[in-house]
Amino acid sequence: MVLNKRKRSNAKKRNLITYTNPDSIISEQYRTIRTNIRFLNGDKKTNILLVTSPGKWEGKSTTAANIAISMAQQKEKILLIDGNLRDPGIHNIFKTSNATGLTDVLTGKVSFEEAVCQSNIGSLDLLTSGAIPFNPAELLGSHMMSLLLKKVHSLYDLVLIDSTSLLEVTDTKIIANLCDGVVLVVRQNKTDIESAFESKKVLEFAKAQIVGVILNEKN
């Protein structure tokens, strides 16, 4: 899967292009990615997909957000979770509060129903990260995380989890095999070939299934 992008002055327009400019070439490319994911899902009613990248600044959060919007525009019930508990960004992309989120659910402070919020874009719900914890890897690998994923699996047509960069910390490796598949985002002129191959090895070692690779910023 290949995604072409051009520079834009408006940050919100750049981040949520499938919402602000649904007729653009880039939006059509996201719809192609949406279709490919649906083919990969086969007859499964619900899939939980992790979106990650080898390193930082490769566009994984923006990609996850636009895939989620593209699917929600098809009247599917979608949940986007910010699983990056070190440097979260989904709340900034959607211009929403991050006062309560995943961290609060995993620590038992609030229920999922209290933490989840509507994006006002189709049937897309958001679960932001919440406050940055001192033990993100432990929270993501906890029994509470497993219970949460089982719960949302039955509530949504598709769940997307935006995670930390794969090669920098252990968080993504911990939750990768709890998901039905992993989408790896790489960026032209940013991701080197060695990092891409190392990411593949790490995911295979974690017994995670790579369902697709998205090439971002293709000229």
Image (tube, rainbow, N blue to C red):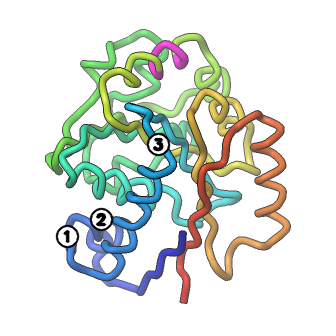
Instruction: Give the residue pinned by disc 1.
Output: 20
Q: Residue at x 74, y 37 (%)?
A: 170
Specify whether residue 94 is painted magenta.
no
Residue 42's disc is 3
Helix, strand or loop under label 3: loop
Instruction: Give the residue pinned by disc 2.
Output: 16
Extreme residue toward the front, this view: 43
1 or 3: tag closer to the N-terminus: 1
Q: CA distance from mark 1 to mark 3?
A: 30 Å
Helix, strand or loop under label 2: loop
In the image, residue 121 above or below residue 130: below
Q: Residue at x 67, y 31 (%)?
A: 177
Q: Residue at x 40, y 32 (%)?
A: 46
* Label 1, residues with CA under 10 Å away: few <14, some 14-19, many ≥20: few
Q: Magenta residues?
A: 145-149
Give, as a three-letter code, the residue at label 3: Gly
Give, as a three-letter code, the residue at label 1: Thr
Q: In which quadrant of the rendered image does the N terminus lie?
A: bottom right
